[in-house]
Amino acid sequence: MAIEVVTTNDLMVGSSVVIEGGSPKGNLVAVFEDDGQTGYFYALDMAAAGNPIQDAMHIYNVSQIADREIASTVKIGWSSDGRKVVLLINNHPHAVFDFENRKGYCRSAFPPVSPSQDWSKDGHGWNNLAIEALFR
């Protein structure tokens, strides 16, 4: 079973951009943002009362990307159940949100504690099992 890629965009790292990809099954949205200094990935639940942002993870610091002058491709893809989402940059997984288990995983493992008290209580450390869960 493959993920369903809902958005594909070209990116010049360090150029401000917001890329959204909604779940094909519900009110969940994943957003990648490069604000010119950093790249972040956000989990949103549009049905949540108040602030829809459930979790946020750091993907990169622009100053640390050696080949930022080369265009990259960003994809946001969802699992078949519409509850797990992956951020792919140049087809390499950088982050995963699991809405069902309220957990985020990213290669930078930052921030160490989620901004939300309800998500990622044990941090954002990368786990290859998160990728495998997309294909169940």
Image (cartoon, helix red, strand yellow):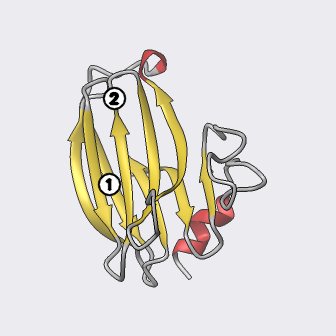
Secondary structure beneath dot 1 equals: strand
| Residue located at (31% from left, 23% from top) | 14
Q: Amino acid at mark 1?
A: Lys
Is residue 90 visible to us here?
no
| Mark 1, residue position | 75
What SS does tag 2 mark? loop
Picture layout, residue 136 above or below residue 47: below
The circle on residue 59 is none
The picture places residue 67, in percent across and down from the top left corner, at 36, 21
Q: Amino acid at mark 2?
A: Asp
Instruction: Classify residue 16 by image quadrant.
Output: top left
Q: What x and y, as percent, mark residue 9?
A: 21, 48
Image mark count = 2
Residue 92 in picture, x, y percent from top left: 45, 49
- Mark 1 surroundings within 10 Å by alpha-carbon count, few (fewer than 14), some (14 through 19), many (20 or more): many
Q: Is residue 44 above or below residue 111?
A: below
Q: CA distance from mark 1 to mark 2?
A: 17 Å
Cβ–Cβ under 8 Å for marks 1 and 2: no
- What residue is rendered at 61% in x and 37% in y? 108
* Quadrant, the C terminus: bottom right
Residue found farthest to the right: 122
Other residues around mark 2 within 10 Å, as few (<14) / some (14–19) / many (≥20): some
Say which of 40 and 62 sits in front. 40
Of 128 and 13, nearer the camera is 13
- Residue 116 point in image, percent of width and height: 63, 52
The mark lying in front, picked from 1 and 2, is: 2
Q: What residue lies at 53% left-to-right and 47% top-to-bottom?
A: 56
Picture quarter with the N terminus? bottom left
Task: Identify the residue position indicated by label 2 in the image.
Answer: 35
